[in-house]
Image (cartoon, grey):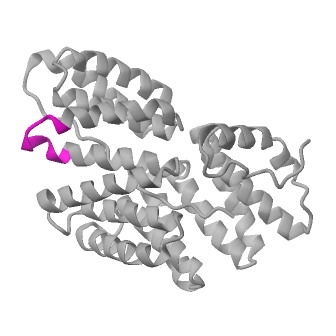
Amino acid sequence: MRNLILWAFFIATVPWMAFGQTSRWDDAINAAERAFGQQQYGEAESQFVQAEKEAETFGPLDRRLGTTLNNLAELYVREAKYTEAEPIFKRALGIWEKGDNSTATEKATALNDLAALYQYQSRYGEAEPLYRQCLALLEKIRGPEHPDVGNTLNNLGALYWEQGKIAEAEPLYQRALFIMEKTLRPDDPALAPGLNNLAALYVRQGKYTEGESLLKRALAIRQAAFGPEHPDLGNSLNNLATLYSQEGRYSDAEPMYLRSLSITEKSLGPNHPEVASGLNNLAELIGRKRNTPRPSPFISARLPYGRRCWGRITPRWPKVLTGLPDF
């Protein structure tokens, strides 16, 4: 059963400018970020593309162009368009690498986001040095206890976790959560990825009580911050359901899986990898509960989406649903 590990992308912040000629870019980038925050991804993409056209007029190394490109690529990752995202991330990084010291924060953003993309594609050897560069840069410009340092530590820990390097992951997760809890409000949604990831590690170690406590905190934070239909809430529901399933608490797990899948399908679309993952988890739960490998009609109707999604998008779970019969 897949237990989701979260890593954080950094949204590049919009540089403040006081020139009238930037107004059309400002309008487009602000509209894009509003739409992104409201999960209106088609509208967000349209506005980001318009913002990119405006930013191109400022010159090939302008910070506003780098910001626009990075955030467009982050949108593509959210939509599971990884092939489209990679060259855009690289172009943004190239712009910021050629800048002066004032672009160091943006460079760290691009390093983190490109590394996270590689991690999602299981390109661990390419991701690790980028995370290491990002971490060193952030510790230099932000200090060792800045929330951005915590995010990168969390991401690096998730990279090790996915490779089965639990001993390397644990101190990174612990340091990341320590930083985030020290520097952020207790209800800040930026805490949730660190809570989730350390919980997953505890579950792997058989520490179910500790894991459940952290997952419930993450779920409560996201529910309060984002409302009932946000994809991050769906992720937290899936994670807590996975814990319950592993403990044999099937009656607690099943409604959480169903609610998680409903949220994820609605917000990300039926072809997204997280839908495939949710289907796989629910199918395994029902198989255990009913002692049969045959999926329910609810799952059967969605199998084509899940198979096509995982087979097309990422090598990490190419056979995630192959244990289920074809219909």
* Vertical comparison of 264 with 217: above or below: above
Residue in view at x 14 percent, y 41 percent: 103
Residue 299 is a magenta residue: no
Q: Position of residue 38 (x, y in %)?
A: 44, 38
Which quadrant would residue 253 be assigned to in this image?
A: bottom right
Residue in view at x 58 percent, y 77 percent: 204
Count of numbered circles on the image? 0
* Vertical comparison of 155 with 243: above or below: above
Q: Position of residue 249 (x, y in %)?
A: 74, 76
Q: Position of residue 119 (x, y in %)?
A: 46, 52
Q: Position of residue 284 (x, y in %)?
A: 78, 62
Which quadrant would residue 51 be assigned to in this image?
A: top left
Q: Residue furthest front?
A: 125
Which quadrant would residue 90 be assigned to in this image?
A: top left
Please identify the quadrant where the N terminus is shown: bottom right
In magenta, the rendered stretch is: 97-105
Of residues 213 and 114, the one nearer the viewer is: 114
Of residues 9 and 172, the one nearer the viewer is: 172
Residue in view at x 32 percent, y 48 percent: 10
Q: Is residue 267 left or right of residue 51?
A: right
Q: Main secondary structure of the magenta part?
A: helix
Residue in view at x 85 percent, y 69 percent: 289
Residue 72 in view of the camera:
no
